[in-house]
Image (cartoon, rainbow, N blue to C red):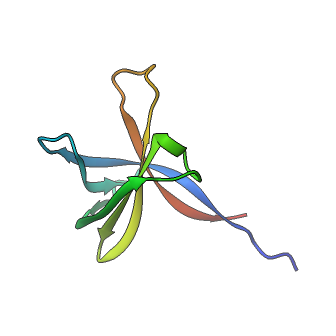
Amino acid sequence: MKQPVIKMERVYVKVNSDFDSTGYMQPRSITWSDGRVFQIEAVKDFRPAGTHHDSPTCDCYTVVIRGETKYLYFQKVNNQHVSRIGRWYVECPTIT
């Protein structure tokens, strides 16, 4: 019997963020497309997401939501859209 393959799928989400005086972006909450809102209790780490994502165009925030560590990604957009700086996503497992 063939084993199911679990792949990670990007799910784009709405994120409310604050910016401090240095320009640091601090995510505060995540809103899913169905309206559920999850408060971000803490940001534990911030770094480039690495080569398995969009290399230099993607950052990873390690956040705490409901006491659990989660990963929130910020994908920077190109300069063709001057009013957009990027969009947020999380990775969710899908079975194929």
Give the number of marks.
0
The quarter of the picture where residue 83 lies is: top left
Q: Is residue 10 left or right of residue 24?
A: right
- Counting from the top left corner in percent of width and height, residue 93 is at 58, 65
Task: Name the residue rendered at 11%, 41% in the picture.
Answer: 21
Identity of the residue furthest to the bottom in this view: 1
Residue 28: x and y in percent read 23, 55
Q: Residue furthest right?
A: 1
**Which residue shows up at 33% across the image and 53% down it?**
31
Location of residue 82 with respect to 51 vertically, above or below: above
Q: Position of residue 79 (x, y in %)?
A: 43, 22
Q: Is residue 7 rendered to the left or right of residue 82?
A: right
Quarter of the image where the N terminus is located = bottom right
> Residue 69, located in which quarter of the rendered image?
bottom left
Of residue 27 and residue 96, the one placed in the foreground of this image is 27
Quadrant location of the C terminus?
A: bottom right
The image shows residue 40, relative to residue 13, as above or below, that is: below
- Judge left or right: residue 4 versus residue 45: right
Q: Is residue 88 left or right of residue 24?
A: right
Give the residue displayed 32% in from the left and 62% down from the top.
45
Q: Position of residue 40 (x, y in %)?
A: 26, 63
> Vertically, is 90 above or below 80?
below
- Towards the viewer: 66 or 46: 46
Q: Nearer the viewer, residue 44 or 8?
A: 44
Which residue is painted at 36% across and 28% down in the image?
84
